[in-house]
Amino acid sequence: MNRIILSLALCLLAGTAMASSVEFGGRLVSSGDTAGKVNQVAGKPDRVVQLENRFGANTGERWEYYKSSKTILITFEDGKVTDIREMFN
């Protein structure tokens, strides 16, 4: 339990928070959601980054949303959300 608290505290101090869900206008995007649902809830991303492994093969996408006080990064693998990060500006 102490390790979890310490990890979360370090992420917050670094300006990045990992989450399993994020809110867009009162609706949630969560890990496991499809790209279609994220598009319905959050709208079109401000930027899409293609993710590659060390051999150059596509492994997924990262959708970036720029809000006034934070950047929200949503990572997809096999068409589903695998990671959500909030970076506070």
Image (cartoon, rainbow, N blue to C red):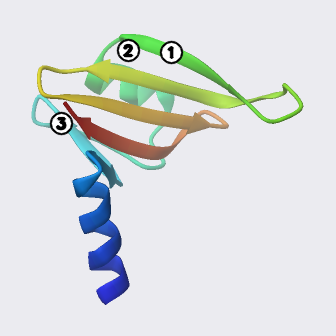
Residue 89: x %, y % from top left = 19, 30
For badge 2, the amino acid type reads Pro
Residue that mark 3 sits on: 27
User: Taking the image as drawn, is residue 88 in sight?
Assistant: yes
**Cα gap from disc 1 to disc 2, whole angstroms:** 7 Å
Identify the element where label 3 is drawn. strand
For badge 1, the amino acid type reads Val
| Mark 3 crowdedness (10 Å alpha carbons): few <14, some 14-19, many ≥20 | few
Q: Which mark is residue 48?
A: 1
Residue 47: x %, y % from top left = 43, 12
State which mark lies toward you, 3 or 1: 1
- The residue at the far right in this view is 55
Q: Nearer the viewer, residue 34 or 52?
A: 52
- The residue at the far bottom in this view is 1
User: Taking the image as drawn, is residue 1 in sight?
Assistant: no
**Cα gap from disc 3 to disc 2, whole angstroms:** 16 Å
First reached walking from the N terminus: tag 3 or tag 1:
3
Q: Which mark is residue 45?
A: 2
| Mark 2 crowdedness (10 Å alpha carbons): few <14, some 14-19, many ≥20 | some
Identify the element where label 1 is drawn. strand
